[in-house]
Amino acid sequence: MRGRLHRMLHGVSASRYSAASTLLLLAPLVILLLLAFYLPLAQFLSRSFMEPTLTLDNYARIADRPIYATILLRTFRTGLIVAVGTLVLGFPIAYLMSTLRGWRLVVVAAIVVLPLWVSVLVRTYAWQVLLGRNGVVNQTLEGLGIIDAPVKLLNTEFAVWLAMTHILLPFMVLPIYSSLRGIPRDLSQSAQSLGASWPNVLRHIILPLSLPGVAAGTVLVFVISLGYFITPMLLGGPTTMMIASLIGQQATKLLDWPMASAIAAVLLFVTVAIMALFQRVLRLDRVMGNG
Amino acid sequence: MASPARPRRARPSLARWLLIGISTLILLFVALPTLIVVPVSLSATEYLSFPPQELTLDWYHEFLTDPDWIRATMLSIQIAFVVAILSLVIGTMAALAMVRGLGGSGWMSVIASAPLIIPTIIYAIAVLLFFSQLKIAGSFQGFVLAHTALACPYVVIIVSAALYRSDPSLELAAMNLGASRPRAIWEVTLPGIRPALVTGAAFAFLTSFDDATVSFFLANLSDMTLPRKMFENLQFFISPVLAVVATLLTVFTLALVGGLSIWQSRRGAQTTIPTE
């Protein structure tokens, strides 16, 4: 009662919560993440150094066996191809979106964003149906007389690239769109009215100003694709294994936990390093843009 | 009918038409492949065929009367429901502390958003190892814990963004009128960010409901979640029932997210679909 009276008489000026209430509010999340996230991760990743005693042997084993380097390189190559694929397909859409207003923008944005929330399993399954021996793609190509017999599309690297490009496209479109949206429309209009040709406007205004978005989208797609598990597993073949499947195989089929842990540590290191590097690039960009 | 006066616009150039043409083709590439599951689910033949020769609802009937599919579906719905509520409460509390307590997030936002950055495969294996020791791998509690850890960051991000946009002086005004801090939060602050709370809960639900990777490693064969059962089917025996599940999942997701966006744009709030 006294507290309430005190508040009524003197007013509340503290706009921030007290340290005690802040801690109390944070506690459930911190406890949850410690128990169900950080502790499991720390335990799993520490096994690469701990088995049987403190050692770097498991990392040496990765370097020794060429198969691991092959799988790592294939994973990076897939990430690169998917990043380029989403960039080529995503840029026109992002640019179109930046020129649209009203319901047209809503429709295009919905087509881009809604698939993000549809289960990856459903979208992967759809590609199985499309790319199968008697799938829609083979039937169409045969019908058009382009091929004589069904082509093997499923369980190839191509199937993985195609489906991952399809699934990860929104992660490319949205960052590019948000940087293009920041460009004042008058800029390209006045450039054009001053006699700049359309390709020149694209080259000197739109492309340079969209670079932060392009960088963000490319890094995002690349990093996400490095850890992709479900799609490569279902659409790729036994000879197209990627790093995520390798980790799963080492842990659950070969029961080689230290090895699974070492490979996971490599993947995690690469992911975090790229993200950290990318943050600096973005900041640098901003600094240079202001200067 | 005269349209209201508009600034005279230049006629769309060739380049503009080219852009629209190319973009339309790409948008078809985005939208159509997923929709292929609808005709397949209605096709009468046992093997995958397109276009379907004959239409039937038999596979829908088979899905609805198969106890295994129904059990997996119900398990996934129950897990996702508990995850949505837990994530909403825990994530909102943390967002309040981060925005109104720490005044900006800094290190705490890094700690809280780590589950979004870590490749899911690493988390899935780690949690399998950890939960096996605790004997909760594959159990209801195990799924709820793992999914809540993955879903909380979404709630924290969505709710913090809404809190940054909302005016903290409303909460203070309520307290000046005699309300305690918890009551001011409950009756003033939270109702003001209701759209963000609903969105956060919905995304937490979907994060759990659609999770395939963690489920793949955590689930045992007797208690399969829906994504785990779908995966099983995809790998070994593709039956048209799978197309039924895929169709229902797609329709459910689109209705949920689409409905949410429409509801929010009616309220003039920030939507899940970027507009202006």
Image (spheres, coloured by chain):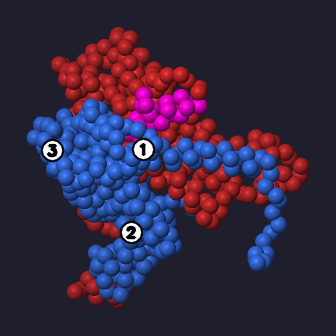
Query: Could you tell me which chain the residue with mark 2 belongs to?
Result: A
Task: Identify residue for label 1.
Answer: B52
Measuring 31% from the left and 14% from the top, which residue is drawn there? Answer: A61
Q: Which mark is residue A16?
A: 2
Quadrant in the picture for residue A141 = top right
Q: Callout 3 environment at 10 Å: few (<14), some (14 to 19), or many (20+)?
A: some
Q: Is residue A126 visible?
A: yes
Which element is circle 1 on?
loop
Marks 1 and 2 close (CB-CB < 8 Å): no
Quadrant in the picture for residue A210 = top right
Q: Callout 2 environment at 10 Å: few (<14), some (14 to 19), or many (20+)?
A: some
Three-letter amino acid code at the position of disc 3 = Asp
Task: Identify residue for label 3.
Answer: B223
Using the image, determine if residue A74 lies above or below residue B90: above
A196 or B253: nearer the viewer? B253
The blue chain is: B
Marks 2 and 3 close (CB-CB < 8 Å): no
Q: Colour of chain A?
A: red
Q: Residue B15 appears at what percent x and percent y?
A: 77, 47
B142 or A103: nearer the viewer? A103
Q: Residue B68 appears at what percent x and percent y?
A: 17, 46
Q: Which residues are magenta?
A: A125-144
Magenta-colored stretch includes residue B39: no
Q: Which mark is residue B237?
A: none
Image side of residue B12 versus residue B36, left or right = right
Dominant secondary structure of the magenta stretch?
helix
B172 or B199: nearer the viewer? B199
Q: Residue A209 appears at what percent x and percent y?
A: 69, 46
**How many labels, in total?**
3
Q: Callout 1 environment at 10 Å: few (<14), some (14 to 19), or many (20+)?
A: some
Three-letter amino acid code at the position of disc 1 = Pro
